[in-house]
Image (tube, rainbow, N blue to C red):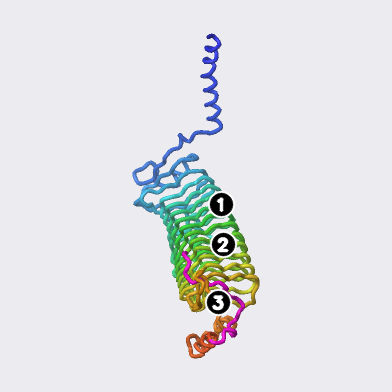
Amino acid sequence: MGKTQNISLRIPPLISLSFFLLTLLFPARSSARVLKVGKRLPFTTINAALKHARPHDTIRIAGGATYRERLVIRKPLTLQGINWPVIDGCYKGHVVEVRASDVSVSGLKITHSNRSSRLDYAGIFAENVSNVSITHNLLKDNMFSIMLQSTSHCAVEHNRVESNITQNPIMGSGIHCWKGYGLRITDNTVGHHRDGIYLEFCEHSFIARNTISDCERYGLHFMFSHYNTYMRNTFRRNRAGVAVMYTHNVTMLNNVFEDNQGTSSYGLLIKELQYARIQGNVFRRNTVGLMIDGGQDLLVKRNEVRDCGWGIRLVSGSSNDTIVRNNFIGNTFDMTTNKSYNGNIVENNYWDKYDGYDLNHDGRGDVPYRPLSLFSSLAEQNSDVLLFFRSFLMNLLEQTEKIIPTVTPDTYQDHTPSMRRWAV
């Protein structure tokens, strides 16, 4: 009985010591404060609140006002706008500059960064930080809207990014990321920049559900950016479409590339890409659906290429690519190439121009389909041939191919063309 009492008397001090040690190891954030900024509130400027803020405080900014000030955040905290307060940088440097990790910026309308032909300025600029969240902001008329440099595990989500490059020729990207790791860029709307989203030296990142339109160059442009996933994005009316360059191990799923039209415009331009899966995408009304230049070990599967000038242009240096179970519908030229066969596989695709038969009803045509027409091959070698498009000469060539199939280039053949469209 006495021993039991001694044990019970020792327990409270042990518990107290444990709580004390936990407090030292994991300091509580219950002391974090909310600092309010606005007219007739404790702080009338955001910089005054930043000066008084402690780590992990929240600075809450009231709407209905314009704050003409530049912000530099040097401690972990939350910057939160209520009812869209405006932060106007007055064309002086970055508008919001993040120099600390574990920062959240949300609910703000950010405008008028500096513009320069020598230096880059942004509406929101973050450098050498991690775990920064930039969400639910409206950025308008900045040189670069959001710029991340040397960052990791940052999120750029649910922002609306706008500018007018026709009125301001000194313009950068909507979302510009250089040297990033584990970035998450989702649910943003970007328009009227030079590039919509630009990634360079960014790895293991996730880019999804963004809508990018009316950019002067590329809707999405990434180089030297490996092991990234791009899903359910829409790229519309961008002058040059989307460009993937000097990259390996990329996944592009269920994206829409549409209405990217011009003399050098593509739904998707691939330049020196290795080990990629391009699946479930829709390429619609582009000058060129897919331009594959130097693609190696690519899987192009279950995509729909529809109403494009050229469906796929497969040019020099592309090898060991698999183009399988895609739909080609309403394209002027389904496929062109300027090279001989180089280990690429074209099989079991649906071609709306295929007029063969399926006697054994296995869903595959019994005679091969040659997607390269004689006219398209001539046009690939000499673009002036396009002057005869839909002319008597072109019709004569098409009729000749039907009567004498051997005149059709047999560089690529689909030996098992699908009789039915694939679900995409």
Closer to the chain start, of discs 1 and 2, is 1
- In this rendering, which labeled residue sits more in front, label 1 or label 2? 2
229 to the left or right of 58: right
Disc 2: CA contacts within 10 A as few (<14), some (14-19) or many (>=20): some
Above or below, 64 relative to 224 = above
Q: Secondary structure at mark 2?
A: strand
Disc 3: CA contacts within 10 A as few (<14), some (14-19) or many (>=20): some
Question: Magenta-highlighted stretch: main secondary structure?
Answer: loop
- Disc 3 vs disc 2: Cβ atoms closer than 8 Å? no
Residue located farthest toward the top when viewing the structure as drawn: 2
Disc 1: CA contacts within 10 A as few (<14), some (14-19) or many (>=20): some
- Disc 1 vs disc 3: Cβ atoms closer than 8 Å? no
Q: Which residues are magenta?
A: 403-424
- In this rendering, which labeled residue sits more in front, label 1 or label 3? 3
The residue at which mark 1 appears reads as 182
The residue at which mark 3 appears reads as 367
